[in-house]
Image (cartoon, helix red, strand yellow):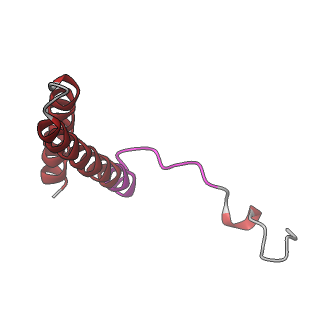
């Protein structure tokens, strides 16, 4: 399943860059083309970011990537603020 998410990630970021370029290079008078390309670029960025975060979560869970630094449970402060 992670390969499918990785492929979707590449496609989404490619769409973001392609449609982002089209939105920025469109004729100023053609607002419909700019808006459609802009919406598709934002959609590509959203899907790309979501799939990237899913890949990071999967790689940490499987041990492929080093987990994030977290405060150990015994050093966390409880609800009252005391250690």
Query: Between residues 3 and 18, which one lies in front from this camera angle?
Result: 18
User: Residue 7: image x %, image y %?
Assistant: 13, 45
Q: Residue at x 48, y 49 (%)?
A: 67
Quadrant of the frame with the N terminus: bottom left
Q: Say how many tags the image has.
A: 0
Q: Residue at x 36, y 49 (%)?
A: 56
User: Residue 10: image x %, image y %?
Assistant: 17, 39
- The verdict on residue 29 being magenta is no
- Residue 80, located in which quarter of the rendered image? bottom right
User: Residue 13: image x %, image y %?
Assistant: 21, 38
- Residue 78, located in which quarter of the rendered image? bottom right
User: Residue 46: image x %, image y %?
Assistant: 29, 50
Over which residues does the magenta segment extend? 56-70
Q: Is residue 28 shown above or below 58?
A: above
- The verdict on residue 64 being magenta is yes
Query: Between residues 70 and 28, which one lies in front from this camera angle?
Result: 28
Quadrant of the frame with the C terminus: bottom right
Q: Residue at x 30, y 53 (%)?
A: 50
Q: Is residue 12 shown above or below 18?
A: below
Q: Is residue 80 shown above or below 3?
A: below
Asked whether, in this view, residue 78 is left or right of residue 7, the answer is: right
């Amino acid at each position: 399943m992670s390969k499918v998410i990785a492929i979707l990630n590449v496609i989404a970021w490619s769409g973001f860059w392609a449609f982002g370029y089209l939105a920025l290079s469109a004729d100023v008078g053609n607002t419909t083309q700019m808006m459609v390309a802009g919406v598709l670029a934002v959609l590509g960025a959203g899907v790309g970011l979501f799939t990237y975060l899913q890949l990071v979560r999967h790689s940490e869970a499987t041990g492929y990537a080093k987990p994030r630094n977290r405060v150990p449970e015994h050093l966390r402060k409880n609800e009252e603020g005391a250690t």
